Amino acid sequence: EAQVTQNPRYLITVTGKKLTVTCSQNMNHEYMSWYRQDPGLGLRQIYYSMNVEVTDKGDVPEGYKVSRKEKRNFPLILESPSPNQTSLYFCASSSTGAATGELFFGEGSRLTVL
Amino acid sequence: LAKTTQPISMDSYEGQEVNITCSHNNIATNDYITWYQQFPSQGPRFIIQGYKTKVTNEVASLFIPADRKSSTLSLPRVSLSDTAVYYCLVGDMRGASKIIFGSGTRLSIQP
């Protein structure tokens, strides 16, 4: 089954404790992206990657890092999480890019930073 | 990047046709228009995409006037399961994939 898998789905952590949210897709998509969703603000793009070893900033990249060492994986790294990073995070992938093709989203990762 | 404006919320009834309009006055020549549907605590799901005129698929139609400064998502004969948030996106077809999701339109369908 074609899917985008995120882990963990739920996480409560404390300020400053590094964490990684993994994202994996099985559709051989070149494009992958991370979004955060906050009440009243819709979805905001954090980082995106057009292909392996190619990443770029979205609208809200501060406090986040990403890497794209393999085509199928695109982990989101919070080096020193802060409470304002409490949010619902979505990973997505596409064969042609976010603007021109269908984005496939994961089920989301709800992160709480205390 | 073109900013989009949608109504915050809409209400309708089962069996009705629902039209959600999105305004994108600053749309660029190379931009596509895409609509997504999102249920609570789930990732958005692609509905339809278009560049100009009209596009239709098995679930919706997308109407884009000649000036492309707005677009209308049309959902025929809605049901309770169409209650969701609908997002209009505008993005560059040349592959620059920094795009903006707006705040979306919360559609509520009543029996």
Image: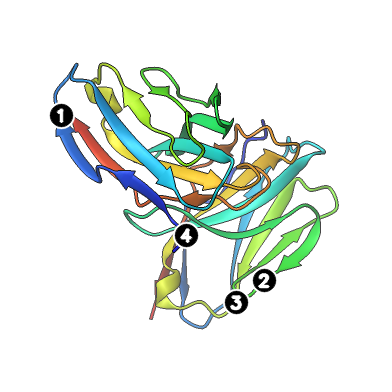
Residue A11 placed where, x, y %?
19, 38
Q: Both on one chain, marks 3 and 1?
A: no
Q: In this figure, which residue is indicated by the disc labeled 3? A: B76
Q: Both on one chain, marks 2 and 3?
A: yes
From the image, state whether disc 4 or disc 1 is nearer to you: 4
Closer-to-camera residue (B40/B98): B98
Closer-to-camera residue (B16/A82): A82
Determine the residue located farthest toward the front in the rendered image. Answer: A70
Q: CA distance from mark 2 to mark 4?
A: 21 Å
Mark 2 vs 3: CB contact within 8 A: no
Q: In this figure, which residue is indicated by the disc labeled 4? A: A2
Q: CA distance from mark 4 to mark 1?
A: 30 Å
For the question of whether residue A38 can be seen, the reply is no
Task: Name the amino acid, label 2.
Answer: Asn
Task: Name the amino acid, label 1.
Answer: Thr
Q: In this figure, which residue is indicated by the disc labeled 1? A: A13
Within 10 Å of the Cα at label 2, are there few (<14), some (14-19), or many (20+) other Cα atoms? few
Judging from the image, mark 3 belongs to the subunit labelled B
Q: In this figure, which residue is indicated by the disc labeled 2? A: B57
